[in-house]
Amino acid sequence: MSESARGRVLDVNLHLLDRQIVDRDGEFVAKVDDLEFERGADGTLYIAKIMVGSRALGPRLRGRLGVWMRSIGERLSTDAIPTIDFALVTDIGSEVKVSATRDDLDAAPLEGWVRDHVISRIPGSRHAGE
Amino acid sequence: MKIFQVALGILTAIGGFVDIGDLVTNGLVGARYGLSLAWATVLGTVGICLYAEMSGRVAAVTGRGTFDLVRERLGPRAGLANLIASFLVTGLTLAAEIGGVALALELATSVNYLLWVPLVAFFLWLLIWRVKFSYLENGAGLLGLALLAFGFALWKLHPDYGSLVHQVVAPHKPGTERLNSYFYYAIALFGAAMTPYEVFFFSSGGVEEKWTRKDLMVERANVLIGFPLGAMLSLSIAACATLVLKPRGIEVSTLGQIGLPVAFAAGKVAIAFLILGFVAATFGAALETGLSCGYSIAQYFGWQWGKFVKPREASRFHLVVLLSLIGAAGLVLTTIDPVKITEYSVVFSAVALPLTYFPILVISNDPDYMGDKKNGRVMNFGATVFLVIIVVASVAAIPLMIWTRAGQ
């Protein structure tokens, strides 16, 4: 973990959950949908990973909406829930900055699928607006 | 350069202010109630100025769009319910705008509007896919200024301005009309002026154009000068209908009837401008609502969004925009009257208003995000008063809709 993120007192609910994750190049990666904690040698809890995607978000939504969100996620993918190592976090402000690029993180498989199977097949998808 | 930027911003804000909701509601209400409901448009305009300023300031200071922050502040569950409601209302508005463009093209060509719908939807998608954000916004806004034909027509009608102003400042419900319908249309005008997508779009547009604190001056000029002047344009539509349609007992049920006073008072060239203005205003608003469908979903889920990256870099965002356009065009193709879709869309907008406006008020007061740019006391007082009005309008809208059978 980098200096800036270490040792700050954070209210996880208020300052971390549901914030936008932004990669090294300023591109949007995902939201902090849920967190995975681990217990250190001295027994204190620390944040190990950021969990992203509808399967991470679903269980946080109570009621039917949550069940739907989770089941849609489960039907779209059988791989493990995508996570981002918390050690990559470099800053927590109005956005959560990470030191990797979006492609390296591979936290949004659906984005890649839509890109490869739908959007890239439409002419002009590689050009920014003119 | 700064002056040019400010002037351009104001002009596009005027031309972009009016959309199909404002056109239809102002024309319809003007023909039926005269200017006795103009207070609702004025009220809605003050409200949209306050809240658009806040959302633009939040975007400039934090670089975050409205829905991004809605989820952060309301939590994921309330945020999702909010997203679903806002998306449906914005999608309905998109359908109304697409129908509006098609109806305007029918006026110009006499080709049935249904044939225009697929073409309009395709062209909308193509522009969103290929054209730079600033060109989209400025182009539609500047062409929308052709609606000044309503102002010209009003001047040509040589009205007794004293009596028009009197109707505005001393509202008096026409004797034959029922009070519940009167307030139903007040809510419709309020919803038309304050449509939620305007705030999503304004804030996301600020992020698209990479606003920073330095741009706050331009942002404020857009809102505080451009929007009120745009509202004057809305009022001139109602005034034209008051002077020409109301005395003749014409009830507005088509887009053509709304333009009738211009044809009556100002002649052929003005009609050409008017139709150009109809097309530009509704097309511009369709671009804004189409993008807003994508913005709201992408911002909730944290996907890459925006036209500042290549489409393949924001693939899910572009897929949502594409599907929204197809869905909205499909709704119009069911042959439901676009004017009716519009009437419902403005009332449902009024219902959904608190969902968008409450979180904006909370965030723009948060020193964590806003630092020294958080709301001042005067702003908070005004915004809180408006929040109360918005909640009342929102709660009353559906019961009034049922009670009056949608204003009959």
Image (cartoon, grey):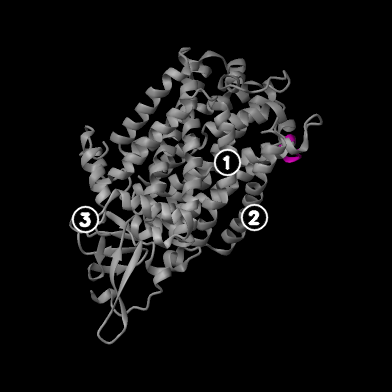
Q: Residues within 10 Å of mark 3 (few under 14, many from 20)?
A: some
Q: Quadrant of residue B178?
A: top right
Main SS category, magenta section: helix
**Residue farthest bottom in this picture:** A42
Q: Residue at (27%, 87%) from the top-left corner?
A: A42
Q: Is residue B303 above or below residue B168?
A: below
Q: Quadrant of residue A7?
A: bottom left
The Cα–Cα distance between marks 2 and 3, rounded to whole angstroms, is 45 Å
Q: Looking at the rendered structure, which numbered label has been put on residue B348? A: 1
The answer for which chain carries disc 2 is: B
Give the residue number, with chain letter if any, for mark 2. B388
- Residues in magenta? B167-171
Give the image location of residue B279, x and y in percent: 46, 25
Tell me the element at label 2.
helix
Mark closer to the observer (2, 1): 1
Residue B170 among magenta residues: yes
**Disc 2 vs disc 1: Cβ atoms closer than 8 Å?**
no
Q: Residues within 10 Å of mark 2 (few under 14, many from 20)?
A: few
**What amino acid type is highlighted by mark number 3?**
Asp
Q: Residue at (22%, 39%) from the top-left corner?
A: A117
Tell me the element at label 1.
helix
Is residue B313 found left or right of B335 in the rendered image? left
Is residue B383 found left or right of A38 in the rendered image? right
Mark closer to the observer (2, 3): 3
Q: Depth check: give the residue in front, B49 or A57.
A: A57
Say which label, 2 or 1, has the lower sequence index.
1
**What amino acid type is highlighted by mark number 1?**
Phe
Give the residue number, with chain letter if any, for mark 3. A106
The Cα–Cα distance between marks 2 and 1, rounded to whole angstroms, is 18 Å
